[in-house]
Image (cartoon, rainbow, N blue to C red):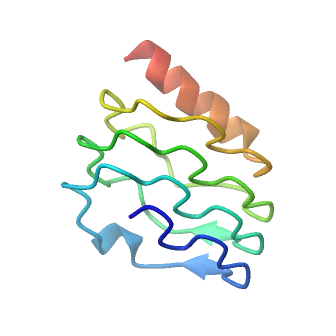
């Protein structure tokens, strides 16, 4: 799923992401990076992230995105690369909540 919506700068919202089977996904790097007009990402909270190793830059550059669905249920045990996950995305609350989830698991 890496780079799937990368630089889709005219994208305003994404629906139907909950229907994607992510059980064998290992890389979500740059998935939504630089979708600068993206305002809403609908339910990704139930994604199976058991095999995902890289989510770096996933929401980087999403400067219009003001909130995310609750991703605290994501299994983060396999995550190796999370750098710049929310860079320039103005999602500091979600970033801190996400880090708290990793540190307390």
Number of labelled discs?
Answer: 0
Most foreground residue, 96 or 50: 50
In the rendered image, the vertical position of residue 95 relative to residue 9, given as above or below: above
User: Residue 20 appears at what percent x and percent y?
Assistant: 29, 70
Q: Which residue is outermost to the bottom?
A: 10
Most foreground residue, 61 or 70: 61
Question: Which residue is at a point 37% across and 17% down the rendered structure image?
Answer: 105
Q: Which residue is outermost to the left?
A: 24
| Left or right position of 68 against 76 | right
| Left or right position of 75 against 85 | left
User: Residue 18 appears at what percent x and percent y?
Assistant: 34, 68
Q: Quadrant of residue 28?
A: bottom left
Q: Quadrant of residue 17?
A: bottom left
| Left or right position of 44 against 47 | right
Most foreground residue, 40 or 76: 76
Task: Tell me the quadrant of the picture where the N terminus can be found.
Answer: bottom left
User: Residue 72 appears at what percent x and percent y?
Assistant: 44, 37
Question: Which residue is at a point 38% across and 32% down the rendered structure image?
Answer: 79
Q: Which residue is outermost to the top?
A: 104
């Amino acid at each position: 799923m890496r780079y799937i919506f990368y630089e889709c700068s005219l994208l305003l919202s994404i629906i139907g992401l909950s229907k994607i089977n992510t059980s064998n996904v290992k890389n979500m790097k740059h998935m939504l990076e630089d979708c600068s007009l993206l305002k809403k990402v609908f339910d990704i909270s139930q994604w199976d992230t058991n095999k995902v190793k890289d989510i770096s830059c996933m929401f980087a550059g999403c400067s219009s995105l003001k909130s995310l669905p609750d991703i605290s249920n994501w299994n983060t045990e396999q995550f190796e690369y999370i750098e710049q996950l929310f860079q320039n995305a103005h999602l500091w609350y979600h970033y801190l909540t996400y880090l708290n989830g990793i540190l307390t698991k």
